[in-house]
Structures are given as structure tokens and as C-alpha cells.
Amino acid sequence: GNTTTKNTERKKKMARMIITLSAPLFYFFFFSLLSHQTMSQPQHMHTFCNATNNFTQTSLYEINRSLLLISLAETSSLVTYLNATVGLSPDTVYGTFLCRGDINATSCS
């Protein structure tokens, strides 16, 4: 009788230990898989364009925009971050370049 009770209690303790250890392991593997899935798919993160305003191809704004894009493209293989401004108001153009840390410089340029 006494041995059976001890064995039953021992089995219950083991079951509680397994459940206690299983929950953190489950969350660890779940979030590991989730982060692997997210990191393995590089993608463009964000673009903001003001669709309400237009500009002509020969405007000073367009020239400044082209100069900014050329500057960002040429510098992208040299630095991981660049914040640039070209022109004077009202034709000022702002641009930011950020190379993600999980990809190499060649992929950024």
C-alpha cells in the first residue's frame, strides 16, 4: 500500500516536472522558428510617397530628387546608414538609406 502511494506520488511529480519544463521549451522553439522565418526573407520595409503632389520632369525638385537618389545609390556600398538632403525650400528633397544588419553590403548596394 505504502509503496504504491509513493510510486503514484513520484509519477505525479514527474508529470508536473515534464509539464513545467515543456512550456518554456515550446515557447523557445516556437519563437526560434518564427524569428528564423522572418530573418530568412529579406524584404523592403517601408516607402513613403506623397501621392497628392506632382512635379514636372524638368523642375528643380526633380533635379534634386535625381541627385539625391544618385548620392544614396553611390554611397550605399560604403556605409550602412545615410541621411541626405539636397536643395533649398521649396524644392528640398530628403532621403534616408539604411542597410539591414542581417545582409551584406553587396546586397545593400
Image (cartoon, rainbow, N blue to C red):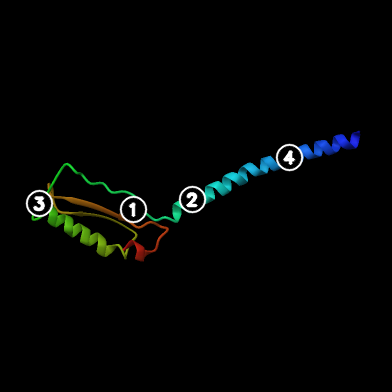
Residue at the spot of label 3? 56
Is disc 1 in contact with disc 3, using a CB cutoff of under 8 Å?
no
Q: CA distance from mark 3 to mark 2?
A: 44 Å
- Numbered circle sitting on residue 44: 1
Residue at the spot of label 4? 15
Secondary structure at badge 3 equals: loop
Which circle's residue, 1 or 3, is located before the other in the chain? Answer: 1
Q: CA distance from mark 1 to mark 3?
A: 27 Å
Three-letter residue code for mark 1: His
Say if 12 sits above or below 38 in the image. above
Which circle's residue, 4 or 1, is located before the other in the chain? Answer: 4
How far across and down, in percent of the image, does residue 96 sit? 27, 53
Three-letter residue code for mark 2: Ser
Residue at the image point whose x is 27% and y is 63% from the top: 75
Residue at the image point whose x is 24% and y is 53% from the top: 95
Secondary structure at badge 1 equals: loop
Quadrant for the C terminus in the image: bottom left
Which circle's residue, 3 or 2, is located before the other in the chain? Answer: 2
Q: CA distance from mark 2 to mark 4?
A: 30 Å
Compared across the picture, whether 13 is left or right of 3 comes to left
Is disc 2 in contact with disc 1, using a CB cutoff of under 8 Å?
no
Graded by Cα atoms within 10 Å as few (under 14), some (14 to 19) or many (20 or more), the crowding at tag 2 reads: few
Q: CA distance from mark 2 to mark 1?
A: 17 Å
Compared across the picture, whether 8 is left or right of 20 comes to right
Residue at the spot of label 2? 35
Secondary structure at badge 4 equals: helix
How far across and down, in percent of the image, does residue 63 sit? 13, 57
Three-letter residue code for mark 4: Ala
